[in-house]
Image: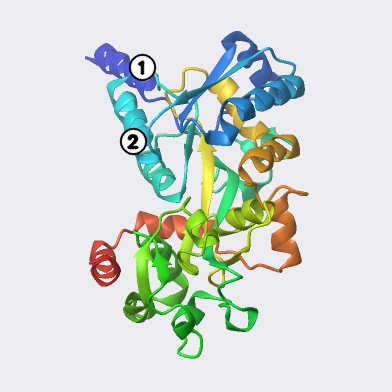
Amino acid sequence: MFKFILALVACLAVIFPTTRPQAQSLEQLIAGAKKEGEVTLVASASTFGGKKGFAELEAGFNKRFGLKHKLNLAPGPSFPQVAARVLTELKSGAKSSTDLYLGSDGTMSDMAREKALQKVNWSGTFPWVTKEMEIFPQETLLVYASFHGIIYNSNSIPKDKAPKSYEDLVDPALSPTWAGKMAIPPYIHWLVRVSGAWGKEKVLSFARKLAPLAGGRLRQGEEERIVSGEFPIMASTGGALEAMWKWQAKGAPLVGLAGSTPATSSYYQLGVPRNSAHPDSAKLFIAFMTTREAQAVLEKYDWRSSYLVDGTLMAKYVKTNKIKLQDPRELNELFMKEDSAFEAELTKILLK
């Protein structure tokens, strides 16, 4: 019987390895990665600049670590769908179809809750990685932040009538400029994010005032309809700053700003599934994505970057504008404590 128990424990250790931080040096990781030879990320085909961006990342990655790796971007479904696939593979004892997982706050909270990610001593292994970059300590690293905020057409809304915060959207002195013409997103997570600072009652009151001002719905990525003047303003979108930089580079009159103080953001992170087929390569690649050279590739193709990496466009903007940021760990707690009744009420008010 005792031998049977020992065998069972050994079997479970293989299927569900320990989640304690793995004490590997950088040299050991590189040596292990050389035996693996490749690393695969299952994500959207446009991730990190798509094929062109990945080719540049591959060259920089191999140069930094002295490798000859192939970086594979395998086009896949949404963050939640990839997470669900990884969890299914983990529970069945199969290797993960993606060597590393890319997700935002909500899906990373799910992965952390399920203890699906390897524990890694990121800041202790890689000299350029700081503890602040570990959004889920010893599990994930921040790759880029995408601020939630207002975007508007500066030709349609004069500077003296332009909003400076979400609260200004419902200010009776300003709102007549966009009443009945404002676009709102077809989802409510942007308001869930501010509920930690505002409180749920203030959020619901704000939503009730905002709803009558709406003239249509826009998704993130449809900023061109603001640029064209179809809608003068959008109440909130993810990537408000990236959209501004992208369109202003083309000469378009698009202005973006953080909607709240502290500013809310989606924190896009990478982590290594416990059942990764190429774990050492995955760890190296994740750490590489927090270097200035990797961040430059993200800026080049997506206008995205991390405010925690010195010299990036986002870091400069946050510093210059003295932006106070929402603590990502508080956001993690918010997502870990789902309030379906609150979310249902918000949906009823804004999206009925």
Q: Residues within 10 Å of mark 1 (few under 14, many from 20)?
A: few
Task: Please say if 17 is above or below 48.
Answer: above
Task: Please say if 8 is above or below 316.
Answer: above
Which x, y percent locates residue 43? 46, 31
Q: Which residue is mark 1?
A: 10
Amino acid tagged 1: Ala
Looking at the image, which residue is at 51% across and 54% down?
224
Task: Look at the numbered disc 1 and give the secondary structure of its residue.
Answer: helix
Q: Which residue is situated farthest in the bottom direction here? A: 173
Real-space CA distance between mark 2 and mark 1, rounded to the nearest whole angstrom:
31 Å
Q: Nearer the viewer, residue 275 or 343?
A: 343
Q: Which residue is mark 2?
A: 81
Amino acid tagged 2: Gln
Closest to the camera, between mark 2 and mark 1, is 2
Judge whether residue 313 can be spotted in this image: yes
Looking at the image, which residue is at 45% across and 55% down?
332
Judge whether residue 120 can be spotted in this image: no
Q: Nearer the viewer, residue 133 or 298?
A: 298
Which x, y percent locates residue 42? 45, 27
Left-right relation of 192 to 56? left
Which x, y percent locates residue 338? 31, 58
Left-right relation of 220 to 243? left
Looking at the image, which residue is at 44% across and 27% down?
274
Task: Look at the numbered disc 2 and give the secondary structure of its residue.
Answer: helix
Looking at the image, which residue is at 45% across and 24% down?
98
**Circle 2/circle 1 CB separation < 8 Å:** no
Q: Quadrant of the C terminus?
A: bottom left
Task: Please say if 251 is above or below 156.
Answer: above
Mark closer to the chain start, 2 or 1: 1
Q: Residues within 10 Å of mark 2 (few under 14, many from 20)?
A: few
